[in-house]
Image: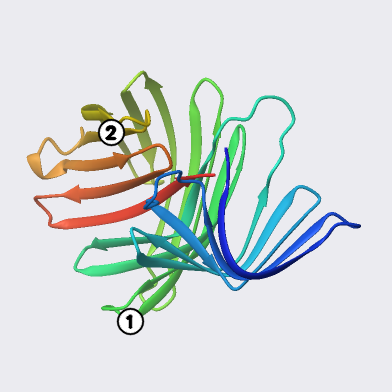
Amino acid sequence: MPYFLNCDLGKIDFQNKKIYIKKGEFTTCSSKKPTWKFKFRELKIENQTLIAKKIIFYYKNFPIAYLPKLKIKLSWKGSFQPTNFILPVKVTYYDKDIELYYFLNYKNKPIKAQWGIFFLPLHKDIGIKFKTSYTSFFTFGFNYKYTFFGKDLDTNIYLSKSYKNLNFLSSYNFEKIDYYVSYKLKIYEKENEKKEKKKIYITPRYHINGKKLSNLKISLEFENDCSKIIYHIDPLSKSFGLNFSIKI
């Protein structure tokens, strides 16, 4: 996947095969008005690795997240498959509060892990959150969440299985087992003259145990060739959230 770079000042060390840049921006979106971009204050490329510092992520010219450092490998062995980079910021309105979640992300098949901190500004609380999963035939995962001042502990283990767009999940919080079913449905797809695709998915998720309509949650997912934004909506309990992932 090509990288598009726009910068003001920089220098090239031909002898050591290094590039140094001060102040600029880069993206993998090929359109004239890229969907997303990183603005940085310092960047260097050496040993087929891009390292940027003091970065602000922009989605459609809106600043979304700050990253102190970002490291990207520019060469891979074998055929390259674009991967999703999940931004370390997630915003959720839930249970009459706003959750600002800043985390570190780790992905190395078949293991995924996330750990970080979150803030509840209306409840004036702060907490830590950790989740990991291992995927083979099934996906087995573990979630841990703790708030310091509210002393709210939320821990569960889960097992899930997907078949095409249908997903089944069971979760155990050391008191009871909950069951969920969800289905990812594509409701829109369009391709422009540059063969760039835009897609919209809707995913209803139902909590089987409750047998109430209030246990229905809906996610809207907007995706193009270089980015994805997901809106999580629970219309009856009036909770919602969003998170971004980009392809690099």
Mark closest to the chain's N terminus, 1 or 2: 1
Whether residue 57 is situated above or below residue 107 in the rendered picture: below
Tell me the residue at 71%/35% (across/down): 76
Depicted 7 relative to depicted 74: above or below:
below
Q: Amino acid at mark 1?
A: Lys
Which residue in the structure is indicated by mark 1? Answer: 124
Which sits in the foreground, 242 or 142?
242
Mark 2 nearby-residue class (10 Å; few <14, some 14–19, many ≥20): some
Foreground mark, 1 or 2, reads 2
The quarter holding residue 121 reads bottom left
Q: Amino acid at mark 2?
A: Lys
- In the rendered image, residue 186, in percent from the top left (x then y), is placed at 24, 27
Mark drawn on residue 9: none
Residue under label 2, please give it: 199
Q: How is the image coloured?
A: rainbow
Q: Nearer the viewer, residue 215 or 65?
A: 65
Within-10-Å neighbours for mark 1: few <14, some 14–19, many 20+ = few
Left or right: where does residue 174 sit relative to residue 22? left
> Whole-percent x and y of residue 193?
32, 30
**Residue 219 found in image quarter:** top left
